[in-house]
Amino acid sequence: MLVNDPVTQARLDLTTALRTAARHGLNEGVCNHFSMAVPGREELFLVNPQGLHWSEVTPADLVMADGEGNVVEGKYPVEATAFFIHARIHQGNPRAQVVLHTHMPYATALTSISDGRIEMCTQNAFRFWDRIAYDEQYSGVALSNDEGDRMCRALGDKDILFLRNHGVIVTGRSVAQAYDDLYYLERTAMVQVLAMQTGRPLHNIDEATVAHAARQIANDTQQAFLHFESLKRLLDRDEPGWRRLAA
């Protein structure tokens, strides 16, 4: 299905990410948020509405909001923390066209242990070499612009932020690229946690080899998009009606 309107395409892509995240077990109740700057109107962003399970969201359900917490389009409210986290990151970091925030279990487990880090012990981990920032300050639920601004500063020039005792934020220039990172981040964390449970030391790879592998992985500019298109085909097969654009 080809879509010429970039805003409609953004709605379809964000819905794909939300529904697939539920299929991959990356969601938590009706909490957490995925957002994307509106193409051509980047002072606004699309975000999943409060109260809907990710597996039931359609493109028509997504809410368009501004950085002040106002709903510009949509019939649902937006959770307060979505404004304070997502709006501030979108406004403060032009690279973060897409912002995905989850409490996915294995990555969040690493935020919950002392000095929890993604270790360079698996090939999947190498794609995240020098791309992760670690926020060591837990300050409570993000219910202020100050907290969103603090997270934005902590993210800096990285693509991913680990929030101590909280969860993760993954950013990107497209939904396909950000979701691919989100998926592989959780797989990386899962294998690492399983390896740690053996009680044996992790076998980290030397920095030069990791940097070389990271460049090799980054040079493949198609895989994330191919992955994302396959996820849409699975939704077409298994979840008729997921593309609904009208309320």
Image (cartoon, rainbow, N blue to C red):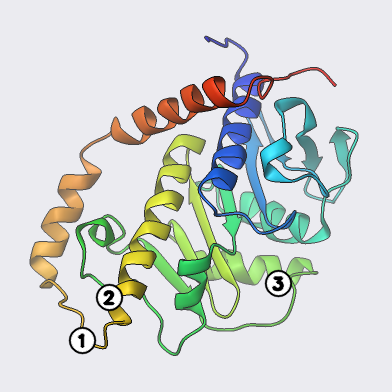
Give whichever of discs 3 and 2 has the lower sequence position. 3
Label 1 environment density (alpha carbons within 10 Å; few <14, some 14–19, many ≥20): few
Label 2 secondary element: helix
Residue 8 seen in the current view:
yes
Q: What amino acid is found at the position of numbered circle 2 in the picture?
A: Ala
Q: Toward the viewer: 36 or 33?
A: 33
Give whichever of discs 2 and 1 has the lower sequence position. 2
Image location (x, y in percent) of residue 193? 36, 74
Gap in angstroms between the C-alphas marked 2 and 1:
8 Å
The residue tagged 3 is: 147
Q: Toward the viewer: 153 or 102?
A: 102
The residue tagged 2 is: 195
Gap in angstroms between the C-alphas marked 3 and 2:
34 Å
Left or right of 191? Residue 233 is right
Q: Residue 29 carries which label?
A: none
Quarter of the image for residue 187 reads bottom left
Gap in angstroms between the C-alphas marked 3 and 1:
38 Å
Q: What amino acid is found at the position of numbered circle 1 in the picture?
A: Arg
The residue tagged 1 is: 200
Image location (x, y in percent) of residue 123? 20, 58
Q: Quadrant of the C terminus?
A: top right
Left or right of 171? Residue 19 is right
Left or right of 213? Residue 156 is right
Label 2 environment density (alpha carbons within 10 Å; few <14, some 14–19, many ≥20): some
Label 3 environment density (alpha carbons within 10 Å; few <14, some 14–19, many ≥20): some
Residue 43 seen in the current view:
no
Q: Toward the viewer: 21 or 170?
A: 21
Q: Who's the residue at 91% across and 34% down the image? A: 75
Q: Who's the residue at 57% across and 30% down the image? A: 13
Q: Who's the residue at 75% across and 54% down the image? A: 30
